[in-house]
Amino acid sequence: MYRVVITGAGSVNALGHDVPDTLEAMREGRCGIGALDFQDVERLSIQIGGQVRGFEAEGRYNRQQMSLYDRFTQFTLAAAKEAIEQSGLTFSGDEAAKSGVVLGTAGGGVSTWDANYRSVYEEGKNRVHPFVVPKLMNNAAASHVSMEHNLKGPSFTVSTACASSNHAMAQAFQMVRSGMAPAMITGGSESMLCFGGVKAWEGLRVMSKDVCRPFSANRNGMVQGEGAGIFVFEEYEHARKRGADILCEVIGFAMSSDASDIVMPSKNGAARAMAGALADAKVNRDQVGYINAHGTGTAANDKSECAAVADVFGPHADKLMISSTKSMHGHLIGGTGAVELLACIMALRDGIIAPTIGYEKPDPECALDVVPNDAREAKVDVVLSNAFAFGGMNAVLALARV
Amino acid sequence: MSVQDKVIEIIAEQAVLEPGDVTMDSTLEDLGIDSLGLVESIFAIEEEFDISVPFNANDPSESDFDISNVQSIIAGIEKLIADQKD
């Protein structure tokens, strides 16, 4: 078994168009959620989201690329460029043949589906652009990253709703840990903030109309976000030999399935995933200083997640910190674990714990240290990142300071 | 068909019961309707009566719509139909 480290990180999300801007916003507890801006938004009952603003595809991508890149692919490519440049890796020869791309997304090219359905159903057109299919397919983003960076090893896309990117990163971790690949590009992206995407979510009646305040007694639901988080997972010796700057180490993961309900989370499934990640990483529960929560801001998630943490950590649950950065960037669905991994890296590397903003009122059923409203300085050695999806599919990653 | 009969029909269909088995004091729990079933029933009611029901699944008690039993649901819907008629 090889050790696996992260040597590059990139992101586009509502808090920033790169990692430094995102981390600065998280340190300052800034909120990236605001009024949604797209066609027909006035017909929605939910009109807020963590929308990426000022990210112009024009100028960034050429005409040919634009016809192939859905917004989720655009975010992915920008984040992948940042991550791979930071790592200093270039892929050629045998290394390129072994290194690949595993990304998560729940919906893929949702705005491409939306725009083309609009054109054929609403506008009555009978012809669509020839590249609709390659643009909207869920693996489009991973494919374009492989093409752009000459990654010829195992590449695919994982889709497990809100846990997609954690499942993807767990898969990439395994590939590097087993020696199958010297490096993997991994993470995830999502862009559902269009009329059809938000309309579908509205139907579930779990969305907040005003603000996302996870763990706060007066929370009233989740808020969607969009964007991408992309990382370079690299074998430790490979990184050390070339003098790479190591951001942190990935030390374990676990996946579990609730096998109970298609939308309601189970405390037991979440607890098994967290306990499994600790066992895989061979760390004791009292070594964990911070958990980046799934923390959606829905009653169902927040209560069961806190109960699961209490079950797994026992008395140590009262000593660790747990925050939900979804309060700032919104819920990026299939890309959410990837953007949230940035908060884990910041905790380990910079000793700064991102806050849960919008927190107003303690909830006795979420009685943990949720780092309310203000970031905190704290030295932590081991952190967990939780993702619990609709369908009861859970994936938890364990990371450590190097 | 009256509002009451139609709502009972919708609830009965969701609960996989005969309308005659749904009484005014039945709770959703009595009828075996879970949170997902409730959201589906509300959708069917909104479609049937062309109204918008203020209901947030995160905290049903905070919503301005009383779901404590079949009677309160029918009363709420009758009020919404009257309020939203224009």
Image (spheres, rainbow, N blue to C red):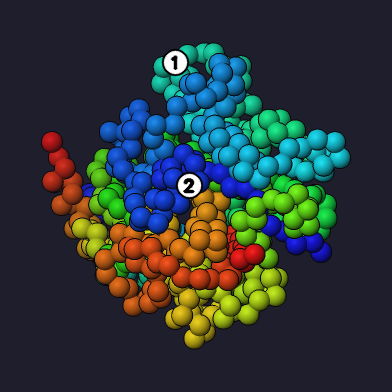
Q: CA distance from mark 1 to mark 2?
A: 45 Å
Q: Residue furthest top?
A: A126
**Which residue is rendered at x = 49% and y = 86% of the image?**
A315
| Residue wearing tag 1 | A124
Q: Amino acid at mark 2?
A: Pro
Of A258 and A66, the residue lying toward us: A66
Mark 1, Cα crowd under 10 Å, few <14 / some 14-19 / many 20+, is few
Query: Left of B9 or right of it: where is A389?
Result: right
**Which residue is rendered at x = 49% and y = 65% of the image?**
A351
**Which residue is rendered at x = 46% and y = 39% of the image?**
A17
Q: Residue furthest right?
A: A94
Q: Chain of mark 2?
A: A
Of A74 and A216, the residue lying toward us: A74
Mark 2, Cα crowd under 10 Å, few <14 / some 14-19 / many 20+, is some
Q: Earlier in the sequence, mark 1 or mark 2?
A: 2
Of A89 and A344, the residue lying toward us: A89
- Between circles 1 and 2, the one closer to the viewer is 2
Q: Which mark is residue A20?
A: 2
Task: Kindly state the secondary structure of the residue where label 2 is placed.
Answer: helix
Of A249 and A102, the residue lying toward us: A249
Q: Residue furthest front?
A: A243
Q: Which mark is residue A245?
A: none
